């Protein structure tokens, strides 16, 4: 199975819009939303069936038993995450606690224990031989990288022998993005022709390069700034990066999304352009396979 | 005493990326004139591209990670068993440390019976300080390939950063995870930037839950407003959320912004729009701080 991951660095450049169009065009049997922090793919590639839901346990959280605690302050002094505070009793802030277990270790009277904590929910939709894996991280939670890994694992386990999986990624370059890159065959970067978009594109490319993953670039809303679009194309050329096309700004795209449709479900300019991008991306993804 | 409203920290966040957090926070700081702008979107910092600050000073941000003295390590594996993050492994008679997975908790060093582990500093990124007109610009930049920017955000928000009688604008990362929570922790007020799409509303709902969870007073700026029904506006009306202002979908704004220009410094119209928005935000903060103290 070839896995295509869609990333952008900057948020709001059109990852989900393009991912959903690709899923429609390819009729992919497996797809996933790795933006566990703000998942949106399900809104547009909705499946009618109810998903199988699984609680996701992140790392455990420390808990102080006030009856045992002798207020020696060792836990507070040794916590690197400032997660322990003293009010009437010693208390752990579950949002700051990373579950490292140092407090439990230093406590001389065994007043601290690590308790399992739910950090999110995994959802798996399976129908008509299609598998859609997604998740939602709990507010303010850490360990989003681990949840991303679970989303991909869940998709793989549920999928039997299929050619292609399409994965919608998250913005940024940090832990959820790094977790999503691991093991994929190609990253498609959706760039935006703005000064911010270019800077963010360069950073996500650098990140993907560190993992040695194949990279392709497309530009969304290219007609909103021709000068910057040209600069991105030139950048790709100079760096020898695969450029797979550009998509115009299209108010019909907004309408389609707001109706819960992909841009290839309606007849619109962005829908036409994304087909080109799709074909070129697939060429790149499967390149060299039939040799 | 209520915190004086002239010295306030305002966090700008959105859930969804690309809704206009940087646009709003940069322009609010610009119209406030003497103010502080802090870019906490350390994975993809963009505010500095608009401010182009001068007199930039740089400071490395590092975390503490373990290093092993193989002469002393006797292979007891206590550290390996202890590490909840699986950042240590004992393979082929050698202790291996996976630096990028380490959370710097210090546990392994503390419990090694042979004192074979010590800490070393590892740079994960940097903070740049500069000035743009009268705005003090702080930018956190995470090195590519690093997993967590939280130590940089913590360093950025160290209390003594802002001068007494001015406003601080915190440009947050997208999402609603730990990194956003860290960014809004000390904020007096949160400005949520929403766009009128199905995705925008869904993600607005998430940050709305987040600010409620942390008991932060907040209001919404509606960006990219077109004629016709605005789903984000509808959401605000239903939930009785204060709408602080509206920014139109406008190609002039889009062009200036995509070229890295600060619209409030380039266009009288936008200077007026952001000045009004700033006044509204200030009034809201004043109201919140006086009623809640």
Image (cartoon, coloured by chain):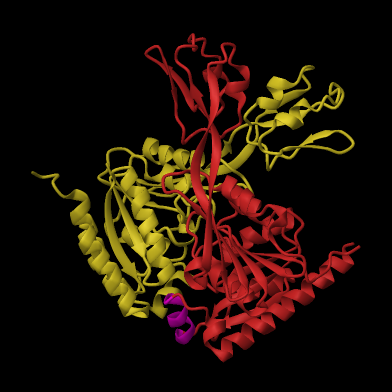
Chain colours: A yellow, B red
Q: Residue at x 13, y 46 (%)?
A: A288
| Dominant secondary-structure state across the stretch colored magenta | helix
Locate the C terminus of chain B and report the quarter of the image it occupies: bottom right
Query: Could you tell me if residue B58 is visible in this image?
Result: yes
**What is the quadrant of residue A182 in the picture?**
top left
Q: Report whether B59 appears left or right of A228.
A: right
Would residue B256 be counted in the magenta stretch?
A: yes
Query: Could you tell me if residue A29 is visible in this image?
Result: no
Image location of residue A149, percent across then percent down = 45, 39
Image location of residue A258, percent across then percent down = 49, 71
Residue placed most toward the observer, A149 or B12:
B12
Locate the N terminus of chain B and report the quarter of the image it occupies: bottom right
**What is the quadrant of residue A81 in the picture?**
top right
Q: Residue at x 66, y 54 (%)?
A: B157
Q: State the count of labels.
A: 0
Image location of residue B261, percent across then percent down = 48, 78
Would residue B231 be counted in the magenta stretch?
A: no
Q: Is residue A208 above or below residue A12?
A: above
Q: Report whether B269 appears left or right of A188.
A: right
Q: Which residue is the extreme one toward the left?
A: A291
Q: Report whether A94 appears left or right of B54.
A: right
Image location of residue A154, percent across then percent down = 43, 38
Q: Report whether A30 appears left or right of B290.
A: left
Q: Is residue A67 above or below residue A182?
A: above
Looking at the rendering, the stretch of residues picked out in magenta corresponds to B251-259
């Amino acid at each position: 199975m070839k896995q295509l991951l869609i990333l952008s660095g900057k948020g709001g450049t059109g990852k989900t819009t393009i991912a959903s169009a690709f899923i429609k065009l390819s009729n992919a049997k497996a797809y996933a939303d790795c933006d566990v922090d703000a998942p949106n793919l399900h809104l547009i590639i909705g499946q009618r069936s109810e998903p199988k839901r699984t609680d996701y346990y992140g790392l455990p959280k420390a808990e102080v038993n006030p009856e045992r605690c002798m207020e020696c302050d060792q836990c507070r002094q040794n916590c690197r995450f400032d997660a322990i505070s003293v009010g009437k009793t010693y208390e752990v802030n579950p949002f700051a606690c990373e579950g490292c277990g140092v407090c439990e270790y230093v406590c001389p009277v065994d007043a601290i224990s690590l308790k399992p904590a739910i950090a999110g929910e995994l959802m798996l939709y399976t129908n008509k031989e299609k598998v859609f894996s997604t998740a939602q991280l709990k507010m303010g939670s850490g360990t989003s990288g681990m949840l991303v890994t679970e989303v991909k694992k869940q998709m793989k386990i549920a999928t039997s022998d299929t050619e292609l999986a399409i994965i919608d990624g998250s913005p940024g370059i940090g832990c959820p993005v790094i977790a999503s890159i691991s093991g994929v065959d190609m990253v498609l970067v959706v760039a935006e022709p703005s000064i911010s978009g270019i800077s963010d594109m360069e950073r996500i490319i650098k990140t993907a390069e560190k993992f040695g993953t194949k990279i392709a670039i497309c530009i969304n809303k290219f007609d909103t700034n021709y000068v910057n679009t040209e600069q991105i194309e030139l950048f790709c050329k100079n760096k020898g990066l695969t450029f797979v096309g550009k998509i115009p700004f299209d108010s019909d795209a907004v309408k389609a999304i707001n109706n819960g449709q992909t841009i290839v479900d309606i007849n619109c300019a962005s829908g036409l352009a994304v087909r080109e991008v799709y074909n070129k991306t697939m060429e790149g993804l499967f390149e060299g396979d039939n040799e | 005493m209520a915190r004086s409203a002239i010295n306030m920290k305002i966090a700008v966040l959105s859930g969804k990326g690309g809704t206009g957090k940087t646009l709003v926070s940069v322009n609010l700081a610009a119209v406030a004139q003497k103010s502080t702008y802090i870019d906490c979107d350390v994975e993809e910092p963009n505010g500095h591209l608009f401010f182009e600050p001068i007199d930039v000073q740089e400071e490395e941000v590092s975390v503490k990670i373990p290093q092993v003295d193989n002469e002393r390590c006797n292979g007891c594996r206590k550290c390996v068993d202890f590490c909840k993050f699986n950042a240590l492994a004992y393979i082929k008679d050698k202790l291996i440390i996976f630096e990028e997975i380490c959370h710097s908790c210090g546990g392994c060093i503390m419990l090694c019976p042979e004192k074979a582990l010590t800490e070393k500093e590892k740079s994960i990124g940097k903070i740049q300080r500069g000035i743009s007109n009268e705005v003090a610009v702080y930018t956190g930049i995470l090195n590519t390939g690093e997993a967590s920017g939280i130590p940089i955000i913590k360093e950025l928000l160290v209390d003594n950063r802002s001068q007494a009688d001015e406003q601080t604008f915190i440009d947050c990362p997208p999402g609603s995870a730990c990194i956003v929570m860290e960014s809004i922790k000390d904020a007096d007020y949160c400005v949520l930037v929403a766009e009128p799409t199905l995705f925008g509303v869904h993600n607005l709902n998430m940050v709305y839950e987040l600010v409620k969870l942390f008991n932060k007073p907040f209001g919404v700026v509606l960006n990219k407003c077109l004629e016709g029904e605005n789903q984000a506006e509808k959401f605000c009306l239903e939930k009785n959320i204060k709408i602080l202002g509206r920014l139109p979908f406008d190609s002039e704004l889009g062009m200036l912004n995509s070229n890295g220009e600060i619209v409030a410094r380039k266009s009288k119209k936008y200077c007026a729009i952001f000045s009004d928005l700033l006044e509204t935000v200030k009034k809201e903060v004043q109201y919140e701080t006086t009623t809640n103290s």
